[in-house]
Structure formats: structure tokens, C-alpha cells
Image (cartoon, rainbow, N blue to C red):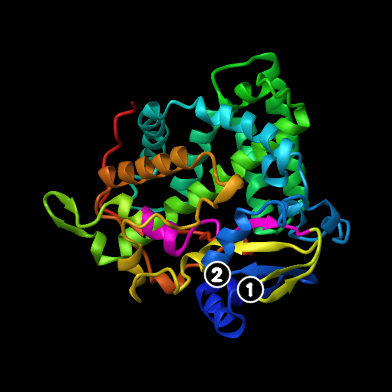
Amino acid sequence: MYTPDFVADPHHTYDEMRSKYGTIVPVLLAPGVKATLVIGHSTAVRILNDPDHFPADPRTWQKTIPDDCPVRPMMAWLPAARNSDGFEHKRFRDASVAGIDGIATDTLPSLVEKAAVPVINTFCRAGNADLVRQYAFPLVLEVLNQLVGCPADIGQRVAAGMAARFDTVKSREGMMMLKQALMELIRLKREQPGDDVTSRMTNHAAGLNDDEIFAQLMSFYGAGFEAQRNLITNALLLMITDDRFAFGNVLGRNLSTINALDEILFNDPPMANFCTTYPRQPVMVDDIWLPADQPVVISLTACNNDPKIRRNNDAEESSLGNRSHLAWSAGPHACPAKDVAYLTVQFAIDLLFDALPDIELIGRVDDLVWRPGPFHRAMTALPVTFSPSPPMNIV
């Protein structure tokens, strides 16, 4: 799952896996790093809802993995909800949920607009842009920084470290950069609390220490920054290359941004393979014995495309309006920020098309390059052209 062939066309790989192995697939996440990939929807749901047999703590496994293993920073234990079960999971998740639930969703349109307009104004007159680097990256970073109360200079270091971690390229250096930046943010919020996610976690009754708050922020930024910017660009790619989303009349597009998001989350979610668990003893799943203390990774993409849950063979038709996908995971570790993330991405896309309605892809879809790493589905660039437009008024 670390090879260029997999990164270029993962769906073909999933189809081959399904034909050869069924729902449970032996894979390598990196050279020498064995894991089990779950590609059956019902099997994944069973595992995600069974933390007793499939705990999320990787500490026994990671003792066998070299420090310089490229996937280790993405998988190593942190005192976070996603790496915990039972009492500790509840303690960490309660603090995280309190931080997230304090976000007033009715303020998100204004927050996203204040972030989007200055970003769009940097390229709207040029008639072309890279929507990964020039739009999704700075927009999502600014929104997240506002939500967590993070100054821009710290946020830039967080973004750079997170990208290196997901790409599994210079991942150790990325992790060091991340921790240094987020620890600086936590110290700042202990001294100067505000109405933000970080401050709410630092003041929560669970009494999290700095390392524990850092771990929850890692999850928030990891899901928020990587997943949201990739969801924005993946949905934009669909909308500017698929005639179903073209402007059909004066009322606008034939299908909406919501349709595009649902389709991407179902067919090609930005977090493609994640939700890793580590059984403490051998366990049989679908007539296959899974070894103890070896990662069991849920392929959210492959499970969503499991032929057993698709209404028909038309992936586009069967995903429209269908939210039975696993893009937000399921069970006790399901994403607590999915509503905030979904609305942020929807507003970001709508604002871009309001400003630049005739966006077109430069080149062919097959020429796009996807970032390395087994965990995400992310383009390196999304080059587009459009009619030059005057800057928008800053809100």
C-alpha cells in the first residue's frame, strides 16, 4: 500500500484484493510492516463496534517497529481518544467533544467567508490557480486556527508537520514540528484562555495535562486539516469534471455541492484507510485468523464500495443522497466533529463557485498526481482555469 501503483489507482488494487482474498486482506503498510486490511462493509462495522476484541491501543505492536519506520508517527500511541478504550477513552473524548460542541455552527458561514474571501482575492484576477495550494490549504488552515484559537505562525508549523506525517515522508521531523507548535499553543491558552477548542479542553473537568491536550489537538488537526482540505479538492475535482454538476440553467448546477460531498465521502473519501485496531489475541473474522498485536486497518474506501451494500452497479447513482458510508468511521470512535467539518467544506466550495463559476480543469484527470501514503486520498495539485474576476469585498 506504499507503492506508486497503489497511490495512482487504489480502486483497482481494492478490486484485485476483493477477487483474491474476500473481505480480509494481508497487506504491507510500509516495507516490512504487516497489517490486515478490512474491505468488507459489514465486517468493518462489526470491528468498529467491538473495542473489547479490537482495542485501539498500539503500544505492544509499536515495540516491534523501528523508530524510523515511515508510518510510525501516524500510528504510534498517544494519550488520545482514538488510541484508547474504556474509561480513558471516555475521559479524552468527553474533553474533545466539549471543545468541539462549543463551536456555534451558525457562525461557520461567516467564519468560512472571512477566511475564503481574502484567499480567493489572491488569485481571482489571474484566471488560473492551484486549488490545493492556493485555496484549500490556506482556507482550511485559517478556519481551524480560528476554531482552536491558534495564532497564524503556530498554525503554519502545524500544517507543515501534519502534511509530512500523512505523506510518510520525513514523518519523524514532521511529528517533532507538530508537537513543538501545539505545545506552544497549549501554553499560550493556559495563560490566555479564550472562546476556542483549545481553551475549552484545557479547562475541562477531566483535567487533561499538556501531553493529553496535545494528543487531542493532534486528532482534531489531523482530521480537520488533512481530511477537510482533501474533501474540498476531491469534491471540486468531481464538480468541474462531471457533467452532472455543470451549470444546466439560470438556477445553477444540475446537482448541488451536498450531492458532490456525499458522493466523494461514499466513493473516494479523503481518509481512505484508517481506524486502526490491535487485537490482543488471535481472533477469527470471516473464517480468517487475525494475529495478535498486528494492525487491523479499515479501508473506508473499499468498504464503502463493497458490492454487497451498493444498490446497483452504478456507483454514482447509488451514492447520491446515501449517507450509510463509513467516511466518518462508526462505533465509539466515530468522528465527533463531522457536522462542523461537513458544513465548513460545503461553505468553502459554494463560496468559490459563487466567485468563480466557470472553473475548469487544466489538463486531464489522468495527469493529476496523488500524494504518497496509505492513509489518505489527496492530490498534490489541482490546476484550474477560469474567467478573471475582480476581487471580492472583504467581509
Taking the magenta stretch, the answer to whether it contains residue 277 is yes
Which residue appears farthest toward the left when viewing the image?
250
Residue for badge 2: 40
Residue 165: give x, y in percent of width and height.
69, 52
Taking the magenta stretch, the answer to whether it contains residue 221 is no
Mark 1–mark 2 CB contact (< 8 Å): yes
Q: Residue at x 34, y 74 (%)?
A: 312
> Of discs 1 and 2, which sits in the foreground?
1
Instruction: Using the numbered discs, state the Cα–Cα distance from disc 1 to disc 2 in whole angstroms.
Output: 10 Å
Residue 134: give x, y in percent of width and height.
46, 47
Residue 118: give x, y in percent of width and height.
40, 34
Q: Which residues are magenta?
A: 261-279
* Quarter-of-image position of residue 33: bottom right
Q: Does the image show residue 148?
A: no
Secondary element under disc 1, as helix, strand or loop, is loop
Q: Is residue 325 left or right of residue 287?
A: left
Residue for badge 1: 286
